[in-house]
Image (cartoon, helix red, strand yellow):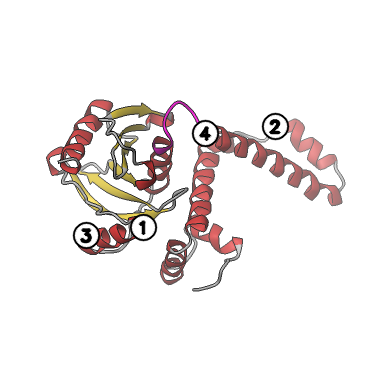
């Protein structure tokens, strides 16, 4: 699969999980070489999740009688136009919500990147990470990020390493490592070399929507952010301390 651009239908089918195994693997390989397209697909995933979360309860509500009467009163040739207008309006509202969520806020950019990556990939069941052995994966990510990528040992916190994947960044590639607890709770560690700075910050904390919690720090090589929507702040802090001590030694 080497075309410079794929049909939108293929990308949406991938996001919706409607591709077979072979086609999915080929498309993921295509995305891995095209950070801009991968970022667009990631945005599609977030949009879909927020659409479902925002309107899940509304889907169970009955259609108001007045609206049914209005639809029945319209000539048949005008009904598709009315439905299309309703769809466009709903899409605009959702888009505004996503833009508001992604807009710059008091938290640093790395926090927003880490939170979005966690939201997109931690919910995946079949393909949350690259299908590679640990050593091969870390070597591959190290080459892409042009620095040594390490997966800290977090067994003491009850977390097992699942794997990781390559992510796009504004100025450089990024990486996401994923861990899972015995109850299925997931924690992700975001590596962002473009967030490096001369002085290390030490551990910092930020929280977001839907229980999202992030501990992050920056040093002269990289920016790191541990994210979870399931661990408490205290639990995530203990995990962050373990990771920080291993990566900064």
Q: Secondary structure at mark 4?
A: helix
Dot 3 corresponds to which residue? 134
Sequence-first tag of 1 and 3: 1
Q: Which mark is residue 127?
A: 1
Dot 2 corresponds to which residue? 64
Label 2 environment density (alpha carbons within 10 Å; few <14, some 14–19, many ≥20): few
Q: Secondary structure at mark 1?
A: loop
**One can see residue 197 in this view:** yes
- Report the span colored magenta: 101-110
Q: Nearer the viewer, mark 2 or mark 3?
A: 3
Q: Residue at x 40, y 53 (%)?
A: 173
User: CA separation, marks 2 and 1?
Assistant: 40 Å
Label 1 environment density (alpha carbons within 10 Å; few <14, some 14–19, many ≥20): few
Q: Is residue 88 above or below residue 64?
A: below
Q: Residue at x 36, y 28 (%)?
A: 206
Q: Residue at x 79, y 44 (%)?
A: 82
Residue 245 occupies quadrant: top left
Q: Which mark is residue 101?
A: 4
Q: Secondary structure at mark 2?
A: loop
User: CA separation, marks 1 and 3?
Assistant: 15 Å
């Amino acid at each position: 699969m080497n075309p410079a651009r794929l049909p939108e239908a293929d990308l949406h089918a991938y996001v919706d999980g409607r591709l077979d195994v072979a086609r999915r693997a080929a498309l993921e390989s295509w995305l891995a070489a095209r950070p801009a397209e991968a970022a667009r697909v990631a945005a599609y995933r977030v949009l879909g999740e927020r659409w479902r979360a925002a309107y899940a309860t509304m889907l169970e509500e009955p259609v108001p009688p007045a609206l049914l009467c209005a639809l029945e009163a319209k000539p048949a040739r005008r009904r598709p136009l009315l439905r299309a207008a309703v769809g466009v309006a709903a899409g605009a509202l959702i888009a505004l919500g996503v833009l508001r969520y992604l807009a710059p806020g008091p938290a640093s950019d790395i926090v927003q990147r880490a939170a979005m990556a966690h939201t997109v990939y931690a919910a995946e069941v079949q393909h949350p990470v690259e299908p590679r052995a640990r050593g091969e994966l870390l070597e591959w990510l190290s080459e892409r990020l042009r620095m040594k990528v390490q997966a800290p040992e977090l067994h003491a916190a009850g977390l097992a390493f699942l794997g990781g994947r390559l992510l796009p960044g504004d100025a450089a590639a990024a990486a996401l490592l994923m861990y899972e607890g015995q109850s299925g709770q997931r924690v992700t560690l975001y590596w962002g070399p473009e967030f490096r700075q001369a002085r290390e910050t030490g551990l910092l904390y930020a929280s977001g929507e839907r229980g999202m919690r992030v501990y992050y720090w920056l040093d002269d090589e990289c920016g790191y952010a541990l994210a979870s929507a399931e661990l408490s702040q205290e639990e995530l802090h203990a995990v962050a301390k373990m990771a920080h001590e291993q990566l900064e030694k």
